[in-house]
Each structure stands twice: as structure tokens, then as C-alpha cells.
Image (spheres, rainbow, N blue to C red):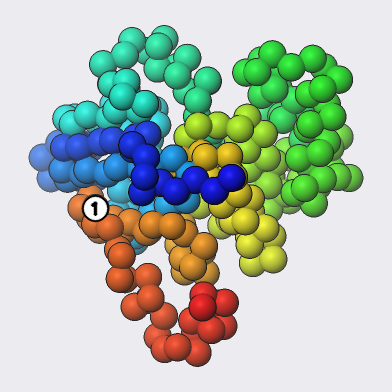
């Protein structure tokens, strides 16, 4: 089934988001009056220079960081009007995350990182969790790495485990902060395909922070954040390619 976001209601709506850090001379306005509407079945990219506020926006939209002002409605529920416990419950139930620093549990093997989500988040039996975890590891090219702990994995492998952990939950919302930064393009492209499938086939609402312009042709929508100001770049993705040969090289058309 292909989800056509244009015919549905947004699953995530935010407006008037402001967030600053520090005071006086040291004050940084990370988000300036940001508004965004995201739809189910859409794979959206969030691009912008380092320090422009991308991770901050992801954290605010996913209920991890309290904005100074503004509102976030996820499934029409006001995320920042919930109690901390309700927000945690919401994240556990509906959200998948891929963080910039992977956030894997050092003591758990790759397989256990995935099994944990299914056992505690979804209530799967041990054998079913193991079956699904192994299936996901295999999809990510990690079939032989299931018994290894994070310190035994390469950066790219850790990143793929983190991606598997987010995807295996079959989340309503998936937030990813540079999920392919540690991957070569072959593995990066695989991951982008998986994220796209989670949106188009499973109807997830996906927002991915990315620097790599090669991801642009895969995205349904592209947003740009510049010094805390958000704009949707409908035309800009193509402008990022210097000429048509570059577009062809990326298989965009
Ligand atoms: N906890 C914090 N305390 C102080 N300043 C912060 C904090 N978190 C973020 N900032 C500042 O807010 C701005 C936006 O940071 P953010 O991490 O959102 O940028 P980013 O776009 O994700 O950058 P990158 O591409 O390098 O990851 C930066 O100037 C950063 O220094
Ligand atoms: Mg960041």
C-alpha cells in the first residue's frame, strides 16, 4: 500500500517553536518561530549547516526537549501539555529514534538491543523477538554480528544496529539524526531505502536530519534550517546539483 500524505491529515503539527540556550553574550537562538506539518507515509529530510538547530528541532518535535514557546501536536495530542510520564509513554508506544551518537547499551549484544524493544516495548515472546531481531540484522547486513557488543562493532555497524532498533518497532513516528553519517553510500542507500519503505509501505511519519545531498532524490519533502529559521525547499533540492550531469549521476531522474 502506498500512503499518499496529501490526502490525509498531518500526524505531527508544530508552530511557533522557539528555543534558545544560554544568556547574554552566550545566548544562542537555536529555533526561531518554527512551524512544520508532517504527514503519514512521508519521508522528509531536514537539512542545514552545522549548528543551525536541526538536532534541537528533532528533540523538540519528539518530546525530548522542552521548547521555550510553541506547540507540538502529535496525533492531535499536545506533546508539551502532557506530564513527563505521559510523554514517555507516548515515545515508547509511537516513536523510533536514531540518535547522532547511536545511544546503544554497552552491555547488550547487537541482537539484544533489538530484542529489548520487541520484548519490553511490544510484549513479544522471547523466541519471536529473537526471530525478528535476527531477520532485521540480516536485512541490515549484520547477520554475523548478532552476538557482538557495541565496543566490538565498527562505527557503521553500530549505526546500523541503531537503525534496526528504531525500525523494528514499526513506529508511527521515526526521527533520525544523520542516520547514514558513518556509512559508505552502498550501506547508506540501503538505509534510505528502508526508511522510505517504512514511510511508504507502513505509513510511518519520518523526519531525517541529513547532510548528504544524495539522499535528496529519495525524499518526499525537504526542509532547510538556517540559523534557527525553517523553510521548505520545494525547488532547492535540484538547485543543489551543479548541473544535469550531477542529477543523472545520483539517479535522480
Ligand atoms: N544544551 C545546549 N546548551 C547550549 N547550547 C546548545 C545546546 N544544545 C544546542 N546548543 C546550541 O544550539 C545551536 C543548534 O544546535 P544543534 O545541535 O541543534 O545544531 P545542528 O544543526 O544539529 O548541528 P550539527 O549539524 O552540527 O549536528 C548550536 O549553536 C549549539 O551550540
Ligand atoms: Mg545535530
Q: Residue at x 67, y 34 (%)?
A: 168
Q: Is residue 11 visible?
A: yes
Quarter location, residue 80: top left
Along the viewing direction, whichever of 56 and 106 lies nearer the viewer: 56
At numbered mark 1, what does the secondary structure look like: helix, strand or loop?
A: strand
Task: Report crowding for label 1: few under 14, some 14 to 19, many 20 or more residues within 10 A (C-alpha).
Answer: many
Ligand 1 has an atom within 8 Å of the beta carbon of the residue at disc 1: no
Q: Position of residue 245 (x, y in %)?
A: 50, 89
Is residue 183 toward the left or the right of residue 211 in the image?
Answer: right
Along the viewing direction, whichever of 235 and 113 lies nearer the viewer: 235
Placement of 154 over or under 59, stated as above or below: below
Quadrant of the drawing holding the N terminus = top right
Q: Position of residue 156 (x, y in %)?
A: 68, 53
Placement of 250 over or under 208, stated as above or below: below
Q: Position of residue 77 (x, y in %)?
A: 32, 20
Q: Position of residue 216 (x, y in %)?
A: 46, 65
Along the viewing direction, whichever of 37 and 148 lies nearer the viewer: 37
Q: Is residue 177 visible?
A: no
Q: Which residue is mark 1?
A: 230
Is residue 123 toward the left or the right of residue 101 in the image?
Answer: right
Is residue 116 toward the left or the right of residue 55 in the image?
Answer: right
Placement of 116 over or under 49, stated as above or below: above
Along the viewing direction, whichever of 27 and 161 lies nearer the viewer: 161
Q: Tag count in the figure?
A: 1
Amino acid at each position: 500500500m502506498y500512503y499518499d500524505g496529501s490526502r490525509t491529515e498531518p500526524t505531527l503539527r508544530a508552530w511557533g517553536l522557539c528555543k534558545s540556550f544560554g544568556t547574554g553574550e552566550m545566548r544562542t537562538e537555536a529555533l526561531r518561530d518554527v512551524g512544520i506539518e508532517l504527514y503519514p507515509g512521508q519521508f522528509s529530510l531536514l537539512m542545514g549547516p552545522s549548528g543551525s538547530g536541526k538536532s534541537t528541532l528533532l528533540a523538540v518535535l519528539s518530546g525530548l526537549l522542552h521548547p521555550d514557546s510553541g506547540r507540538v501536536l502529535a496525533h492531535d495530542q499536545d506533546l508539551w501539555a502532557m506530564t513527563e510520564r505521559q510523554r514517555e509513554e507516548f515515545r515508547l508506544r509511537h516513536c523510533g529514534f536514531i540518535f547522532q551518537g547511536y545511544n546503544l547499551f554497552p552491555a547488550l549484544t547487537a541482537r539484544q538491543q533489538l530484542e529489548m524493544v520487541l520484548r519490553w516495548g511490544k510484549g513479544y515472546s522471547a523466541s519471536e523477538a529473537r526471530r525478528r531481531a535476527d531477520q532485521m540484522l540480516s536485512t541490515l547486513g549484520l547477520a554475523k554480528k548478532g552476538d557482538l557488543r557495541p565496543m566490538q562493532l565498527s562505527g557503521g555497524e553500530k549505526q546500523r544496529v541503531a537503525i534496526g532498533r528504531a525500525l523494528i518497532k514499526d513506529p508511527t513516528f521515526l526521527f533520525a539524526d544523520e542516520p547514514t553519517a558513518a556509512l559508505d553510500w552502498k550501506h547508506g542507500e540501503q538505509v534510505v531505502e528502508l526508511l522510505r519503505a517504512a514511510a511508504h509501505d507502513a505509513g510511518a511519519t519520518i523526519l531525517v536530519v541529513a547532510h548528504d545531498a544524495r539522499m535528496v532524490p529519495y525524499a518526499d519533502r525537504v526542509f532547510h534550517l538556517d540559523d534557527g529559521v525553517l523553510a521548505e525547499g520545494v525547488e532547492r533540492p535540484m538547485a543543489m546539483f551543479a548541473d544535469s550531469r550531477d542529477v543523472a549521476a545520483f539517479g535522480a531522474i
